[in-house]
Structures are given as structure tokens and as C-alpha cells.
Amino acid sequence: MDFNFTEEQQQFADALRRYLDKHYGFEARQASVRSEAGVSEEHWSAFTELGLTALPVPEAQGGFDGGTVDMLVVMQELGRALVVEPYWSTAVGIEALKLAGTGEDDDVALLERAAQGESKLAVAFHEPDARYDLFVIETKATRQGDGYVLSGTKSVVLHGAQADRWIVPARLDGEVTLFVVARDAESTQTTAQVTDYRTIDGQRAATLVFNATPARKLNGRHAGAAALEHIADYGIVLLCSEAIGALDALNHATVEYTKTRQQFGVPIARFQALQHRMVEMLIHTEQARSATYLAAVRYSSNDVDERRRAVSAAKVRVGQAARFVGQQAVQLHGGMGVTNEVAAAHLFKRLAIIETTLGDVDHHLARSVALPGFATADA
């Protein structure tokens, strides 16, 4: 299988990397993290001008109709630079509209706004005590007049407070159904209660409490439980792609640091034992990269189990690599590896959060085992 990027994909990645190298250095990133909003509207506008927000949107709605491989190219660059703007959450929200929407009226208008960078989205996947189970859903939808209202709580909604539209799974007559909730900052009666906070990796998340909150039902042909799992798999592919970029950056930072830190009068990079450890870090990264590229290709498979198998395999391998590479990088940096003054510590934190987002290694191993065709060796 050919995993080489096309000329257009490589040019897009190069343009994005040039922007990030020039305008999104470590100090600029930290300034965004420390700001009250936790994100930068200036960088978001630049991403829009570069075409990032339009990339996953269908051409009919003003986008470029980019697939998962196109998104992989982008997410690798964003992961390398530790970008904190709500791109992942918006891209996953766009995929939710594509999968569960009708492609008409309000869905079209929202996709057009997202393509232009005017609307930020977030998918409220999880609820308190649900752990990684997407279908532990206690949020209830009730018909009210010609529409619906939601009641319930969603937890750890990534960039939930930065979004103006939420895609919310809820139970309607016992069935999993997807709704769009518009954030009305001016209303004090029926809007959701939003608690915004910073996560340990410098990103933002929120708890959303709905209390008879007006919602619009997504009426596409595939807007139920299967769509929710499909959307989550898309999010996982993008997370794994981001992790590859972060792993590359962490490997590079570690090699550079060992060239400057000296013991016994020589750089520690010359010690063979440490060279072997850095080679192992690279091997873990390359194995994770291969699994992620395969998952990006298999995501569009008509065979649902093939998609699940490839996505979970990538999440497992990326999770294992994130932990190994992160721990080794911290040790090779010495005490500096746990300080906020160096990028390595922040890369490690981001990788740790990616490993636990939408299912950790154990969760996806269990998911793989449960798929048809999994064979175990006889005792």
C-alpha cells in the first residue's frame, strides 16, 4: 500500500508548517494557554485563511471535501506545534453533521459557517461515570411543540466553552439520537450551564448541564448509535494523527537536548546506551505512524468491523508509543523534562491526554477482542 502523500497534500503541510514555525512558536503557544480564553482568535483566523476550516467540509458547502488522509496531514503539523485552538473539536463536529445531517437547510448553513471559520463546533461524547462507554447516555430529549428540549449533563467536552454549536447525543424514546444545540450567550433561562476549565495539557474542556435546553434533531438517515460510534472513530484517527506529530517533535527535542547536555566532558548523545534508547523511541513512533496511516485509509471502508479494527489498533499502538516515548524523553531530559520551561514536558502531557481520550489502550484492546474474527491461541 502506498502511504506517500500527494503533491497537493505535501504542499498544504509545508505551508502550514511554515506558518506554525513563524507565528506559533513555544512562547506564542504558551501565551494562548495563559490567556483568559485559552485560545487565540488571531491564530483561528489564520487557520481559516490557510483553508484548514474548509478542508473537511463538502465542496457544495464551500469546502475542499478533504478525507481522513488529508486531515492526517494537517493534524500531524498541529500536533508538532502543540496547537491549542479548537480545530479537532470543530473538525469532528463537521464530520458529525456530514454523517448524521440531511445535507439541507440548517445543516448546510452550519457547514458553510464552519468552512468560513465563523462557527466552532464540539461533540459532547461523554457523561459523568460513563468512562469510555459512548452509549452510557442519561441525557434525555423530550418533544416540546415542534421541537425538542434536552436535560442532562455532559462532561469533559473538549473546547465546549469555545464552541457556539454542540452536537449532543441524547436518548429520545430510549433510542440514541443526535441533536444540535446552539449556545445562546444572551439567554438566561433555557441555555446550557457551561463550566470551562483548562486541562493538564493546556487545552480547554467544559462541563455542560442542560435543563430544558432547546435542541434541533439531526434527521439524516444515519443519526443514531452507529453514527455516534462512527464519529468517535473519526475523532480517534485525528487524535492519532496529532500524536504522530507530537511524537516526532518529542523525539527531535530529545535528540537535540542530548547533544547539548554534557557529562564527563562529552555530550550524553555519545553514550551508546542512550543512543539505543532513542532508537527505541523512534521505532515506537514509526510503528504508531504505520498503524495511524492504515486507520486513516480504512476509516472509509464499507466494512464496519474493518474500520473498527484498524482504528482501535492505531489507538492502542499510539497509546503505547505515547507512554514509552514520553517517559524516555523525560528521563533523558533529566530534571528539565518535568518543568514548564521546556516543550518536552508539554508534549508529554499532551500525549498522555491523547492516550486517554475516546478510550485508552485497555479499552481499545477489549474492543478489538470483541470484534468478529478475533482468534485466540489454544492453551
Image (tube, grey):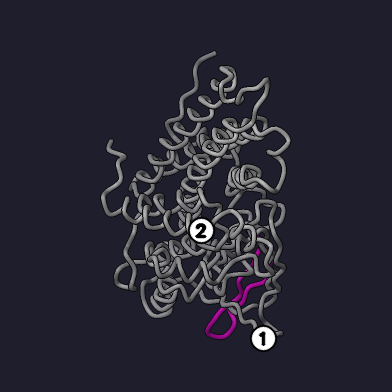
The residue at the point 47 percent across, 38 percent down is: 314
Vertical placement of residue 54 versus 146, above or below: above
Res. 90 mark: none
- Dot 1 amino acid type: Ser
- Asked if one can make out residue 175 in the rendered structure from this viewpoint, the answer is no
The residue at the point 57 percent across, 25 percent down is: 269
Most distant residue in the front direction: 265
Q: Which residue is mark 1?
A: 187
The magenta segment: 137-152
Q: Which residue is mark 2?
A: 88
Disc 1 and disc 2 in contact, CB within 8 angstroms: no
Is tag 1's residue or tag 2's residue first in the polypeptide sequence? 2
- For the C terminus, give its image quadrant: top right
Left or right of residue 141, residue 73 in this image: left
The residue at the point 43 percent across, 79 percent down is: 106
Q: Secondary structure at mark 2?
A: helix
Vertical placement of residue 237 versus 286, above or below: below
Q: Secondary structure at mark 1?
A: loop
